[in-house]
Amino acid sequence: MPCHFEFQCYGIVFPALAYTGPSGTTLQISADAGPLPCSVENIDSRARLQNLVRQMRRKFPGQLVVSDSQRLTLSEEIEIEGPVTAVSIFKVVTKPVLGMRPLINLLKTQF
């Protein structure tokens, strides 16, 4: 039976879904990191944001995209090994969520 829940970090709500399939248990997380700031229209600001997104894509295996409505969205699917517990879920979401910190800090402080 799927398990729906959400958590909040850095002021962003992360909806999550854990489900068991033929290959094991998978956790899907997503987040709306917010709109691209208008100041990204500035060439220097846009270049800083694009550079950061490129760096994050190399380190972060999930999908970081700009939606049609100019919002930054994140999605990730993570396999959970072993029994599914609060601790095992926390362990697998920590890396992608902490990986968003540079982007969130940049959006909050630079734009």
Image (spheres, rainbow, N blue to C red):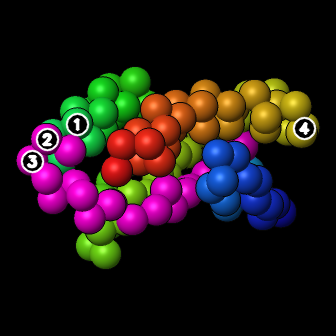
**97, 103: nearer the viewer:** 103
Q: Which residue is mark 1?
A: 48
Identify the element where label 3 is drawn.
helix
In the rendered image, residue 94, in percent from the top left (x then y), is placed at 68, 31
Badge 3: how crowded within 10 Å, few (<14), some, or many (20+)?
Answer: few
Q: Which residue is mark 2?
A: 44
Q: Which residue is mark 3?
A: 43
Distance from label 2 to label 4 (Cα)?
Answer: 45 Å
State whether residue 51 is above or below residue 6: above
Query: Outermost residue, bottom direction?
Result: 69
Q: Which residue is mark 4?
A: 85
Looking at the rendered image, the disc whose residue lies closer to the viewer, 4 or 1, is: 1
Identify the element where label 1 is drawn.
helix
Looking at the picture, which amino acid does disc 3 mark?
Ile
Dot 3 or dot 1: first in sequence order is 3
User: Is residue 109 shown in magenta?
Assistant: no
Labelled pair 2, 4 in contact (Cβ < 8 Å): no
Identify the element where label 2 is drawn.
helix
* Residue 27 can be seen, yes or no: no
